[in-house]
Image (cartoon, rainbow, N blue to C red):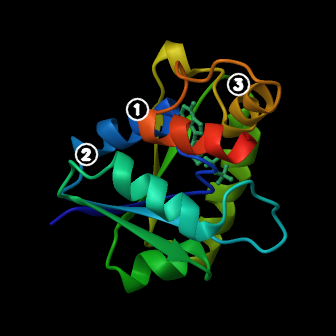
């Protein structure tokens, strides 16, 4: 069984994340969508809220499990017997950061490899932060988020 782990903040999940997840599901039998808990990173949604949104949005996929993680990603991958870490690439800006992260993970554990999926052009400039900014100013967010995530975002901004 091919198992992978897709880690991220998912604050909240966007259509860009969903695009990457759907691509990964064609390659892996089991995909753990992992909420990386970083106490230094301020998030709009709590870990519990992010998990609730992910579970609702991804409910139709039986190969997916949503979990929270407080340890290193490679350590979690090993624990879950996952061979790969999945990450998404948007426009050029992601490359530097992802390159650094993948190298660090490889030093930590060379048996776990990272695979990248390039997002659809429609999502190439989409980020959770941009959507939060739009929502904060009352802008329309339905183009960017799965419906349940959009509802939760509107509730949050009230
Ligand atoms: P992190 O805080 O780890 O960057 P994110 O939730 O922002 O967490 O992103 C998780 C992963 O999903 C990263 O690999 C990121 O590049 C990717 N990603 C985020 N938004 C998109 C998008 N619109 N299209 C494709 N990949 C994306």
Q: Earlier in the sequence, mark 1 or mark 3?
A: 1
Out of 148 and 95, give the one closest to the viewer.
148
Judge left or right: residue 63 versus residue 148. Answer: left
Q: Secondary structure at mark 2?
A: helix
Q: Secondary structure at mark 1?
A: helix
Q: Is residue 152 above or below residue 23?
A: below
Please tell me the numbered disc located at residue 25: 2
Please tell me the numbered disc located at residue 19: 1
Q: Secondary structure at mark 3?
A: loop
Closer to the eye: label 3 or 2: 2
Please tell me the numbered disc located at residue 147: none
The C terminus, quarter of image: top right
Q: Position of residue 123 (x, y in %)?
A: 54, 21
Q: Earlier in the sequence, mark 2 or mark 1?
A: 1
Inter-mark Cα distance, 3 to 2: 24 Å
Please tell me the numbered disc located at residue 92: 3
Query: Tag count in the figure?
Result: 3
Q: Is mark 2 within 8 Å of ligand 1?
A: no
Residue pictured at 52% horizontal, 82% vertical: 75
Q: Is mark 1 within 8 Å of ligand 1?
A: yes
């Amino acid at each position: 069984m091919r198992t992978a782990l897709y880690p991220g903040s998912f604050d909240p999940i966007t259509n860009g994340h969903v695009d990457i997840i759907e691509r990964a599901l064609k390659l892996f039998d089991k995909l753990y969508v992992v909420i990386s808990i970083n106490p230094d990173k301020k998030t709009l949604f709590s870990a519990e809220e992010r998990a609730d949104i992910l579970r609702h949005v991804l409910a139709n996929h039986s190969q997916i499990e949503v979990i929270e993680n407080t340890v290193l990603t490679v350590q979690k991958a090993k624990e879950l017997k996952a061979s790969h870490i999945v990450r998404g690439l948007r426009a050029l800006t992601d490359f530097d950061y992802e390159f650094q992260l993948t190298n660090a993970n490889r030093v930590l554990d060379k048996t776990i490899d990272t695979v990248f999926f390039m997002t659809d052009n429609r999502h190439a400039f989409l980020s959770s932060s941009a959507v939060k900014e739009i929502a904060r100013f009352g802008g329309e967010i339905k183009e960017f988020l799965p419906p349940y995530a959009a509802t939760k975002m509107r509730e949050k901004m009230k």
